[in-house]
Image (cartoon, rainbow, N blue to C red):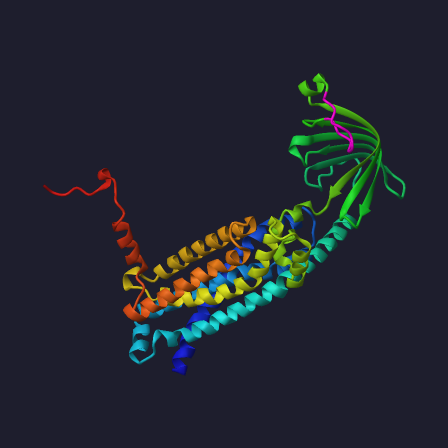
Amino acid sequence: MKKLHRYIFGEVFTYFLLCLFLLTFVLLLNRIFQLTDLVVGKGVPFGLLARLLLTLMPVLLLAALPAAALIACILAFSRLSNDSESIAMTATGMSLYSQLVPVGVLGCMAAVASAFLMLYGLSWSQRVTEAITAEIFQTRAAAFEIREQVFNDTFDGVVLYVRKIEGRDRKMRGILISDSREPENTQVIFAEEGMLVSDAASRRLVLHLSQGTLHKFGSEPGKKTGQAPQPAPPSARENPYQVLRFSTYDLNMDLTQTLRETRAFRTSLRAQPVAALRKQLEALEPGTVKYNAVLVELHKKFATPLACLILALLGAPLGVQNRRSGRHGGFALSLAVLLVYYLLATFSEGMGESGVLPPSLAAWGPNALLLGLALWAIRRVVRRGAVDLFGLLDRALEKVPLPRRLQPRTAA
């Protein structure tokens, strides 16, 4: 029995490593395309990009572990079933419950790895990502240089032209700026003088302009806080073009705008440790949307790792298919189960945040349904020797009434 256990574990573990590598690589491809522009278009050193990709690994592995556990168990037991090895093991007295022991070991390993990533890996990834963001800012700020009589387009949506640069403080004269970062509020700025100042606290460059005009198109006249809005004159409504004169004007040049658009730079509740989530619960009012979101995320810290074990136990009986399903049937089945699981988890999470479901039920409900499905599949395999889901689907479709024009014609 121990040799058979080691044999089954070797089969499942091999498929698990292969699926984990492929899934992580596929998830990483999307991020690589997003971050390549930082090296090509933004001048970020390749070493910083490699470190940034390393910080993404906890996020990617956390998404790939449950899927890899399910697909590995389905593919391994599908191969054993198609090659009649599972029948031979059953003939020697090794029941399906005994064959599930290696699957449980693999599921526990995946659950422990997922729990470590949820409790420690995500928070580490967030901290290191913020440190790399600050380093990228310093690198770009140091490397940024405005050249005379050249259109500078380093910043997204901003084109800067300077006629002359004077002195050690690099004071600029004859400045033209085209700012189209907000398509509905395009503006062109002319200024006699200007100076670029680095603001390390907010990770941006501030361009101090003096004695100039600002030309806006497509925006309403500005409103001061604390005053009632004044109706715009008829000419402003008919012609949204405006010209504003200023003595001083500060233009923010965000160096990390492109980075914040990627998921690696988005702060989320999932990246916060358990202690921080509990502190937020104490400060929030129970029943609010934010309170429910924090509570759902706190439960998911422990529900997500357990899903790895449940999916592994579900994949083993689902892999014992009829021969007519073929070797590719197990892979198609695993994709269908994963799609249903992630849709159900996302839907229940949204209902938990909105208060339709209790947050605990929203986090643990999908796991409970998966566990019930796994127990049903295991019992059916023990009694009948296989789970013919394709046959169940065929019989279910046969009971669906078809319109008369779609029904097959019978010979008279």
Q: Position of residue 248 (x, y in %)?
A: 84, 33
Quadrant where the image shows the N terminus: bottom left
Q: Residue at x 57, y 66 (%)?
A: 115
* Nearer the observer, 410 or 332: 410
- Which quadrant holds residue 127? bottom right
Q: Residue at x 45, y 66 (%)?
A: 310
Secondary structure mostly seen in magenta is loop
Q: Residue 4 versus residue 255: which sits nearer the camera?
A: 4
Q: The C terminus is located in which quarter? A: top left
Count numbered badges in the picture.
Answer: 0
Q: Is residue 152 left or right of residue 376?
A: right
The image position of residue 161, as x and y in percent, is 77, 34
Q: Nearer the viewer, residue 186 or 285?
A: 285
Residue extending furthest toward the bottom:
2
Where, by quadrant of the figure, is residue 99 drawn? bottom left
| Image: 320 above or below 202 | below
Q: Whole-percent x and y of residue 83? A: 31, 70
Q: Is residue 214 magenta?
A: no
Find the residue positioned furthest to the top: 234
Side of 309 relative to 175 (left or right): left
Q: Is residue 231 inside the magenta stretch?
A: yes
Q: Is residue 19 visible?
A: no
Q: Is residue 107 visible?
A: yes
> Hey, which residue is sitting farthest left in the picture?
412
Instruction: Name the outermost residue toward the front.
Output: 286
Spot occupied by residue 87 in the image (x, y as percentages of width and height): 30, 74
Q: Tell me the magenta residue range.
A: 221-232
